[in-house]
């Protein structure tokens, strides 16, 4: 039986578990591919950058600046949310752009709607710390309400009323695609 840990300890335990399963094939350091450096390898042991939206790839390799990664992790841990899940949500919502605005009116890194931001005490949705704190709190509320990460993500995207109305992920293509994209990022590209 695998023990589920939360937060940074859970992430570290999962990385070690995956390394143990992969054996000698596991990368020694982030950004390195074991056994790949050779004269015939143009990347000299480094992972080649993947193009955004490459055909057939479900994982967008967007990278957050280090200062945002730290803020994302802090907000997630304070809200009791898995930092990896929240990071995947932020990457999907805004591509880590603190000034992001959607056509529907969602704002900032975690794309909070103005009324939701107000209800969470976010006075400036373009302030990264406020926005991330509010987004993590909202995701935590959705997880508590629906008891499932996929349903919580669907509620984050389409609203909790839609998830309740349909008794699951709503039959909206946008919401279904959103849940799949976030979960693929969270699972490292695995469905």
Image: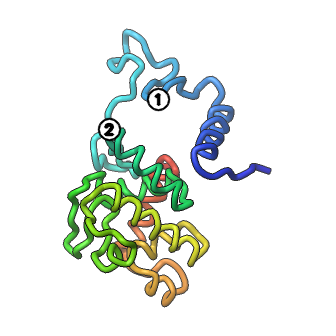
| Relative side of 99 to 112, left or right | left
Eyeballing the image, is 98 above or below 155?
above
Q: Which of the two labelled residues, at mark 1 and mark 2, occupies the earlier sequence position?
A: 1
In the rendered picture of this protein, how many numbered marks are placed on residues?
2
Residue density around tag 2, few if under 14, some if 14–19, many if 20 or more, within 10 Å: few
Marks 1/2: CA–CA distance: 15 Å
Front one among 121 and 184: 121
Front one among 188 and 143: 143
Q: Quadrant of residue 117?
A: bottom left
Where in the figure is residue 71, as x and y percent of width and height?
40, 49
Name the residue beneath numbered marker 2: 50
In the displayed orientation, state which residue is furthest to the top.
Answer: 39
Where in the figure is residue 61, as x and y percent of width and height?
35, 43
Residue at image x 54%, y 23%? 28
Eyeballing the image, is 115 above or below 81?
below
Q: Which mark is residue 165?
A: none
Residue density around tag 1, few if under 14, some if 14–19, many if 20 or more, within 10 Å: few
Where in the figure is residue 152, as x and y percent of width and height?
50, 71
Where in the figure is residue 187, as x and y percent of width and height?
52, 51
Front one among 150 and 138: 138
Eyeballing the image, is 95 above or below 144?
above
Name the residue beneath numbered marker 1: 30
Front one among 173 and 155: 155
Residue at image x 36%, y 38%? 66
In the displayed orientation, state which residue is furthest to the right.
Answer: 1
Secondary element at tag 1: loop
Q: How is the image coloured?
A: rainbow
Secondary element at tag 2: loop
Residue at image x 31%, y 66%? 111
């Amino acid at each position: 039986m695998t023990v589920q840990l939360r937060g940074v300890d859970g992430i570290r335990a999962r990385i070690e578990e995956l390394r143990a399963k992969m054996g000698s094939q596991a990368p020694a350091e982030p950004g390195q591919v074991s056994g790949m450096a050779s004269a015939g390898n143009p990347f000299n042991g480094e992972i080649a950058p993947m193009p955004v939206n490459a055909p057939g790839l479900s994982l967008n390799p967007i990278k957050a600046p280090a200062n945002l990664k730290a803020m994302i992790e802090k907000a997630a841990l304070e809200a009791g949310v898995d930092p990896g899940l929240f990071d995947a949500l932020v990457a999907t919502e805004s591509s880590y752009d603190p000034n992001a605005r959607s056509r529907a009116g969602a704002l900032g890194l975690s794309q909070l709607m103005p009324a939701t931001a107000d209800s969470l005490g976010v006075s400036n949705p373009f302030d990264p710390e406020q926005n991330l704190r509010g987004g993590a709190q909202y995701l935590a509320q959705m997880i508590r309400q629906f008891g499932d990460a996929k349903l919580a993500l669907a509620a984050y995207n389409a609203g909790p009323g839609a998830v309740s109305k349909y008794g699951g992920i709503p039959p909206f293509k946008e919401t279904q695609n959103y849940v799949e994209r976030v979960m693929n990022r969270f699972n490292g590209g695995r469905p």
